[in-house]
Each structure stands twice: as C-alpha cells, then as structure tokens.
Image (cartoon, rainbow, N blue to C red):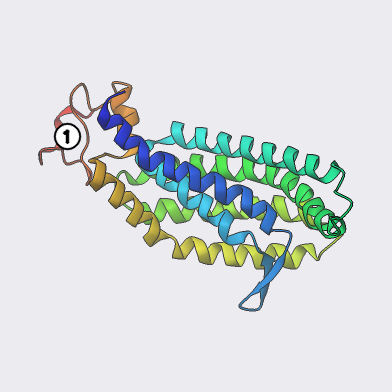
Amino acid sequence: MSGSDKNEDRPFILLVSIFVGALVISSVLASKIIRIFGLFVPAGVLAYCITFVVTDVISEIWGKERANRVVFSGFIALLVAFLLIRIALFWDAAPYWREQKAFSTILGSTSRIIIGSFIAYLASQYHDVWAFHIWRKLTGERHLWLRNTASTVVSQFIDTLVFIPIAFYGTMPVFPLIKHQYIIKVLIALLDTPFVYLVVILVRRRYSMEGGAAQEITQKGGRYGEGKTPGKDDGEGTQGGRAGDSRN
C-alpha cells in the first residue's frame, strides 16, 4: 500500500469508527425515552441518525461496495455488543454491589432493543446505500443534497416502522413513538445535509479524491476508459478538460 493510499484511508477509518460507536451506543441510549419539542422518542435517535450521515459520505466518496462493507461491519459490532451484554447480565455480581436490579432493568431492555436494531438496521441501512446510488445514477455528481435526503428519509421510515414495535411493544405506546421518532428523524435528515457537504468537501480537497461512483467505474475499466477519470463537477476532467470524449 502506497503512502497516498494510507493517507486516504485515514478519513475512512475515522468515519467507520464514528459509525460503529454511534450505532452501538444508540442501542444502549434507546432504553430511555426523552422529549424533544413535545415529541417523545428514544434517546438514541441522534446517535443513530449519525450513522446515515456516515454511510452517505462513504457512499459519495468511496462508493457502494465500501459502504455496504461498513454496514456489515456495524451488524457484527451490534452482535458482539449483544453477546457481551448478555454475558454481563448473567455473570454473578459481587456481594457488596447493590445495583444489579437497575443494571438488569437498563441492559435487559437494551438486549431487546438490540434485537430490534438487528432487523431494522439491516433493512434500512442496506436500503439507504442502495437508494443513495440509485439517486446518484440519476443526478451524477450534482445534487448531493437530493440523494442524501431522499435516501435517508425513506430508509429512516423503514427503520422506525420495524424497530419501534420490536423494541417497545407491550411496554410503551408504539404508534406515538413511531410517529414522533420519524418526525425527529426527518428533521435531522434535513438538517444534516450541510454536514454531509462539509465532510465530503473537506475529504476530497485534503486528499484530492474523486467521487466514489467515479472510482468504481474507473477501477472496473468503465466508460471513462484507461487513464481518464471524471472530474468533481459535472464531467470536468482532472486537468480542467471534459471527459465527454471517452463517454459512450
């Protein structure tokens, strides 16, 4: 691996770290229901929304294949967290430790939440990556805001509709939680677009990287041909020329 490749992996590793950390902690935080502007939602909603920001950034810069790998890595992290929580719950407590009941109440419900997260996560995150690239094919290098928002809004609906009943049915009012959480998720999806733009611009400028879709096409010997890569803005080449000559 060249020095350049190692440098380009630094932001990717950082984003994956944020993704996994936000994903796992969101399942723990979700055991508490909070109020935001009069709406009642699991406390993990913000942390979980961060994961969609990260997958959209990775999709935009590194492409669909890497984004799907990150989603699978997140699933493994959730599985490991679930197993470790179950082990901790069944382990005998020290005789002088008096917080076993509270510990079991919080992390016991977290186990159910993580199971709900398994199913909702796989459905929504893989859909998000798929939808993002469908929109990317339609918009090319333009309108990042559209593919970010459109893919996330639908994916979050899938996630909310699957997650809330599994995690909270029988213990909390399901339909109000679905409605309130989805409203908050949509608001966050609308507000996170500037952050997606900011991270994408910073990474591309710092490491002189092109878009993920363009990288995948180039690596597979696609329509741009050998030695030619699409530019960052609507088909302009890396030296300011147009890549149109090598298109089908």
Q: In this view, does 216 lie to the left or right of 52?
A: left
Rendered image quadrant of residue 84: top right
Image point 43% across, 39% down: which residue? Answer: 13
Q: Is residue 241 left or right of residue 40?
A: left
Q: Identify the residue at the far bottom of this view.
A: 38
Image point 46% across, 64% down: which residue? Answer: 190
Instruction: State which quarter of the image contains the N terminus.
Output: top left
| Image height of 179 relative to 143, above or below | below
Task: Categorize mark 1 by other alpha carbons within 10 Å: few (<14), some (14-19), many (20+).
Answer: few
Image point 56% across, 48% down: which residue? Answer: 21
Q: Is residue 37 left or right of residue 230?
A: right
Q: Is residue 143 left or right of residue 241?
A: right
**Residue 156 percent coordinates (x, y):** 59, 54
On the question of residue 158 being in view, the answer is: no
The residue nearer to you, when weighing 172 against 30, is: 30
Instruction: State which quarter of the image contains the C terminus.
Output: top left
| Image height of 248 relative to 160, above or below | above
Which amino acid, by three-letter code, is at mark 1? Answer: Gly
**Residue 54 percent coordinates (x, y):** 46, 48
On the question of residue 157 being in view, the answer is: yes
The residue nearer to you, when weighing 189 against 107, is: 107
Count of labels in the image: 1
**Residue 197 percent coordinates (x, y):** 34, 55
Image point 16% across, 41% down: which residue? Answer: 236
Rendered image quadrant of residue 210: top left
**Residue 140 percent coordinates (x, y):** 31, 43
For mark 1, what is the residue? 244
The residue nearer to you, when weighing 87 against 95, is: 95
What element does badge 1 sit on? helix
